[in-house]
Image (tube, rainbow, N blue to C red):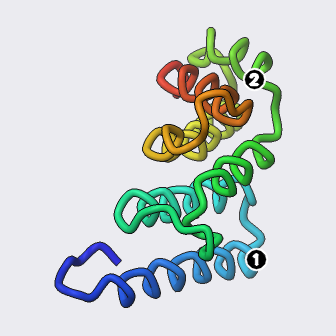
Amino acid sequence: MQSSRYATEERIRWGHLALAVISKEYKQAAHSGIKSVGESARVRAYMIQEFGACESDAARQPALLCTYVMENIDMALTEVTSMAEDWRNRPREQLLHLRRIKNMVTPLATVQHLLGADDPLRQEVEAWLALAPKLP
């Protein structure tokens, strides 16, 4: 997917394959869904950045990606903000959870500008992106 030696269409197919593998891997291994969201968000954000947004390809729709991530964050922004203030004193499991949230949100930095300036989704994403550097 990342090698420019291949045609764009082939690279996009590789991106879709990567997304399918991520989905299948986490379903079979019963790993945390939040971890798979972070991995798929990175792939989808890369595809949007590299190949452009595309309304006919759900993997390359910035609003769908942002909605997907926002819907899978299982804590309120205010709660995560509070936890971020003293994350160094938190138990390991909470640290890992905060890190996974950061991993989910960070890829959105490359696509959030594609949302409308007045879009409430963009404002929500920007709030999370502002918090991300404060997370472990």
Residue 17 screen position, x and y as percent: 52, 85
Residue 46, above or below 27? above
On the rendered image, what quadrant is the N terminus found in? bottom left
Residue 36: numbered disc: none
Is residue 127 found left or right of 136 in the rendered image?
right
Q: At 80% from the left edge and 47% from the top edge, which residue is drawn?
A: 71
Task: Please give the residue where the numbered disc 1 appears in the rendered image.
Answer: 27
Residue 51 screen position, x and y as percent: 38, 68
Which residue occupies the foreground of this view, 59 or 116?
116
Give the residue type that dot 2 points to. Leu
Residue 100, above or below 119? below
Residue 4, located in which quarter of the rendered image?
Answer: bottom left
Check disc 2 and report its element: helix, strand or loop: helix
Pick whichever of labels 2 and 1 is earlier in the sequence. Answer: 1
Is residue 57 found left or right of 109 in the rendered image?
right
Give the residue type that dot 1 points to. Lys
Residue 8, above or below 82? below
Q: Residues within 10 Å of mark 2 (few under 14, many from 20)?
A: some
